[in-house]
Every structure is written in structure tokens, then in C-alpha cells.
């Protein structure tokens, strides 16, 4: 027995119009029809709808969701694992934000201004100090870490905002290439990878092509890095990794 549009809308907490729209754009087509021609959703359709709603909650656009789920290589189990990691990261970040709110309120009551509060305000969901302890533990004794710490200590709110704008532009340009079907080995993709390498070199520490390749490996093995790029565009983590490697090869690295 299939489920009617009204039943699915009620159990999923979404509108009938939304389900009709998903059907119209081919994102979620009901697998069955009643004798009278009405849409009927199977239990498998409901699982698909759940995945669509998870992706929406994580900030993915409908076009990106459709492209991802219609890919012949799409694996439902792997998608659920990715969603679990991304939701866990999001939940952890929300908990950090709640804790920050509590500390801010406490500081206001005591007349104390939070340290660096203004600095990190421009980053929205991203806090550059979030992994500071881990970074120091892994790379604290390296020249790159010491140089990065020396430079960033002097940055103002305006500096961080400019860096954020530069990074967002690179992400937008990369997503545009992906939408246009431009391969990661294309010169345009490699040029963006080079732009990103030079950005690191200018803002944080000397970043050779070899160093950039090492960073690229992290983008596809560390769920946090992967989630950051996947929020911009589905498949961007792997695309960015491949463009960086191609750029290093182009440079003879």
C-alpha cells in the first residue's frame, strides 16, 4: 500500500506543494500511482525523501541534491554516513555557540568584554580558533605554525573580513566551473588552485606546491574539511583536491 501525498506531507512535516515541486523537478518522483492516477509514495521513496531533507538541512541546494542523488555512483549508505558526519559537526558547532552565548551573557553581567569577540564575529558559523588547540598539537613545532601565529596575531577585523571575502570568491568561482562541467585538470581550475595556494602563502605561511598537495589530501580524508567544501558544492572536496594536484604537476612539483 502506497502513501498519498497528504500522508507523506503530514508525516514529514512539509507541504504538499513542496512534494509536488520535488516531483516536477525530478528530485523525488512517487514510484506508484493509484487507479485514479494519484501519486503514491513507497517506503523506499520515504527513505529518499529523508535524505533530501537531511541535505536541505545541511544547506545544500535542490540542484546540487538532484545532481548528487542522480549520479550513477551515488551510494545511499555512504551518503547517510556523510550526512551523519556533517550533522554531528553542525551539532557540535551549535553546542559551542550556545556555550559562547552563555559566557557572553555572564561576561555582560559582570561587566567583562569577551576577548576577540569582535574579531570572530565576521566569520559567522566559522571560527578560525575552533581547532587552534589541535593545530598547535599537530604542527606547533613547525616553522609554518610559528610563522602563521606571528602573522595572524597582527590581523584586524578588517583583515579577517578581507580574507573571508577572498576565500568565498574562490569557492564561488570553483562552484561555477563545476556547474559548467569544467574538469579539475582544466587550466581554469588549476589557476584557482594556484590562487588559493598564493592566498595561504600571503596570509599565513610560505606554501610550496608540495605543502599545498599535503593540504589537499586533508581535504578528502578529514570529514570536517570535506564537509566545509561539500556545503559550497557537492563534490567540491574531491574536485579541489584534484585541481591542486594538477596545479602542482603543472608547476613541476
Image (cartoon, rainbow, N blue to C red):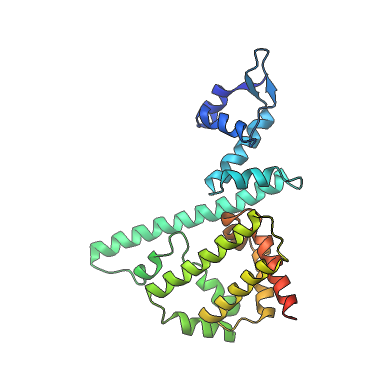
Q: Residue drawn at (72%, 80%), measured in percent from left and top?
A: 251
Work out which quarter of the rendered image holds the C terminus and state it. bottom right
The image position of residue 112, as x and y in percent, is 26, 69
Q: Quadrant of residue 218?
A: bottom right
Q: Quadrant of the N terminus?
A: top right
In the rendered image, the residue lying farthest to the top is: 36
Give the residue displayed 58% in from the left and 78% down from the top.
198
The reply to whether residue 129 is visible in this rendering is no
Disc count in the image? 0
Above or below: residue 246 compared with residue 227? below
Q: Is residue 50 left or right of residue 186?
A: left
Q: Position of residue 130 (x, y in %)?
A: 49, 67
Q: Position of residue 240 (x, y in %)?
A: 66, 64
Give the answer, above or below, for where 154 lies relative to 42.
below
Question: Between residues 218 and 40, which one lies in front from this camera angle?
Answer: 40
Spot occupied by residue 224 in the image (x, y as percentages of width and height)? 59, 61
Q: Nearer the viewer, residue 235 or 89?
A: 235
The residue lying at 55 percent from left, 44 percent from top is 56
Residue 170, visible in the rendered structure: yes
Q: Is residue 110 left or right of residue 180?
A: left
Residue 184, quarter of picture: bottom right
Amino acid at each position: 500500500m502506497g502513501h498519498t501525498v497528504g500522508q507523506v506531507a503530514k508525516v514529514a512535516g512539509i507541504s504538499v506543494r513542496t512534494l509536488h515541486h520535488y516531483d516536477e523537478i525530478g528530485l523525488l518522483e512517487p514510484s506508484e500511482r493509484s487507479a485514479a492516477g494519484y501519486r503514491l509514495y513507497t517506503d523506499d521513496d520515504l527513505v529518499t525523501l529523508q535524505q533530501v531533507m537531511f541535505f536541505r538541512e545541511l544547506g545544500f541546494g535542490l540542484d546540487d541534491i538532484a545532481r548528487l542523488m542522480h549520479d550513477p555512483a551515488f551510494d545511499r549508505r555512504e551518503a547517510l554516513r556523510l550526512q551523519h558526519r556533517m550533522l554531528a559537526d553542525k551539532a557540535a558547532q551549535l553546542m559551542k555557540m550556545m556555550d559562547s552565548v552563555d559566557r557572553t551573557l555572564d561576561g555582560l553581567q559582570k561587566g567583562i568584554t569577551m576577548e576577540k569577540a569582535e574579531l570572530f564575529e565576521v566569520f559567522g558559523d566559522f571560527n578560525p580558533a575552533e581547532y587552534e588547540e589541535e593545530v598547535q598539537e599537530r604542527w606547533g613545532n613547525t616553522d609554518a605554525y610559528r610563522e602563521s601565529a606571528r602573522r595572524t596575531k597582527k590581523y584586524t577585523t578588517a583583515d579577517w573580513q578581507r580574507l573571508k571575502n577572498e576565500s568565498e570568491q574562490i569557492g564561488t568561482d570553483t562552484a561555477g566551473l563545476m556547474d559548467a562541467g569544467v574538469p579539475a585538470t582544466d587550466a581554469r581550475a588549476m589557476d584557482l588552485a594556484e590562487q588559493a595556494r598564493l592566498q595561504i602563502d600571503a596570509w599565513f605561511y610560505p606554501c610550496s606546491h608540495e605543502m599545498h598537495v599535503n593540504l589537499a589530501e586533508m581535504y578528502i580524508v578529514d570529514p570536517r574539511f570535506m564537509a566545509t567544501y561539500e556545503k559550497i558544492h557537492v563534490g567540491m572536496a574531491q574536485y579541489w583536491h584534484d585541481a591542486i594536484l594538477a596545479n602542482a604537476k603543472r608547476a613541476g612539483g
